Image (cartoon, helix red, strand yellow):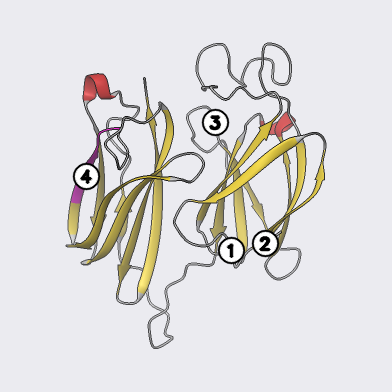
Amino acid sequence: MGPLRLHSASGFASCSWASLDGAPLTEARYSLFTITTRTQNSGMIWEGTRTIHNSWGKAPTWIEPVRLGLTLTLRSDSIRVWPLDGSGARRGSGRKIVPASAGTFNLILDQSQDQTVWYGIEQLGALSGVSDRGEAVQPAALLLKQSHPNPFRVSTQGHTEITFRLGQPGEIRLVIYDLLGRQVRELAAGPAGAGETSMRWDGRDAGARPVAQGLYFYLLEYAEAGMRQHTAGKLLLLP
C-alpha cells in the first residue's frame, strides 16, 4: 500500500514507482512510474522498427497496453504527469492534477492513449524554502544545463559533460540514475562554490563497469542556508 493504491486495471501488468531525487515518494519532486505488461520485451529500445511507436498494441509491437486507475498520497498542492516519448523527453504539456482531498490524487494511466511505458511525475507547490526560523526564503539561483553531447556514445565521444551553476556556495550532490530509479554513479558530493561547475560521466557505474545503452537521469541536489533544492535532466547513452 504505502503512498500508492491501485484500484483498477484493464489487464495483467506490473508497475514500479521510483523517486528520482532520493527523497521519500511522498515528498519527491521528481519520480518515475513504469508499467510493464506481459508482452514487453526486456531488451526493447526506443529506436528502429521494433518500438511502441509502430502499431501500438498490435504485432509486431511487443507491448500490450493497459489502463490503470491509481491513487497517490503525496505532500503536494498539485502534481503534473507526463508521458515520456522515445527519447525520454516530456510529451506535450502534461496533465495537472489537483487532489481529490488533502494529499490524495486520483489518476488514470492509459497506455492505449499515451503510447508509453514511462510516466514522469512532478510534485508542484511543495518545495518552497523555509529557513530554520520558520521564515519563507527565496530560492538561491540554481541552474542545471543539458548534458553535452546528448545523445552520446562512449566509443566515439568518450564522455558527456554535465554543467551546473550556483548563485551561492553550498552543499551539492550530483548522481546518475537509471530508468528504474536505481543509483548508477555519484559524480560529485560535498561543498561547491558559486559559479559554474562541470562534471564528466564516461558511461560507467560506481564499479567502473560500462552500463547498458538507454536513457538515464542526472539529479542535482543543492543545500544552502537551511533550504534544499533539486533539479534533474535526462541523457541518452548510445551503443
Q: Secondary structure at mark 1?
A: loop
Q: Quadrant of residue 63?
A: top right
Residue type, mark 4 in image: Met
Highlighted range, magenta: 197-203
For the point 55% across and 60% down, which residue is it?
Answer: 124
| Residue 138 image position (x, y, % from top left) | 37, 73
Q: Quadrant of residue 227?
A: bottom left
> Percent from the top left, x then y, of residue 183?
41, 47
- State the CA–CA distance, disc 4 to disc 2: 36 Å
Q: Which circle's residue, 3 or 1, is located before the other in the chain?
A: 1
Which residue in the protein does label 4 denote? 199
Q: Earlier in the sequence, mark 4 or mark 2?
A: 2
Horizontal and vertical percent for residue 160?
Answer: 26, 34
Tell me which label, 3 or 2, sits earlier in the chain: 2
Residue at the bottom extreme, as displayed:
133
At label 4, counting other C-alpha atoms closer than 10 Å, the crowd grade (few under 14, some 14-19, many 20 or more) is some
User: Distance between the Cα atoms at labels 3 and 4?
Assistant: 27 Å
Secondary structure mostly seen in the magenta stretch: strand
Q: Earlier in the sequence, mark 2 or mark 1?
A: 2
Measured Cα–Cα span from mark 1 to mark 4? 30 Å
Label 2 amino acid? Gly
Find disc 2 in the rendering and name its residue.
2
Left or right side of 171 for 80: right
Q: Are marks 3 and 1 in contact (CB under 8 Å)?
A: no
Please determine whether, in this image, residue 43 is positioned above or below residue 23: above
Instruction: Read off the residue under disc 1.
Output: 26
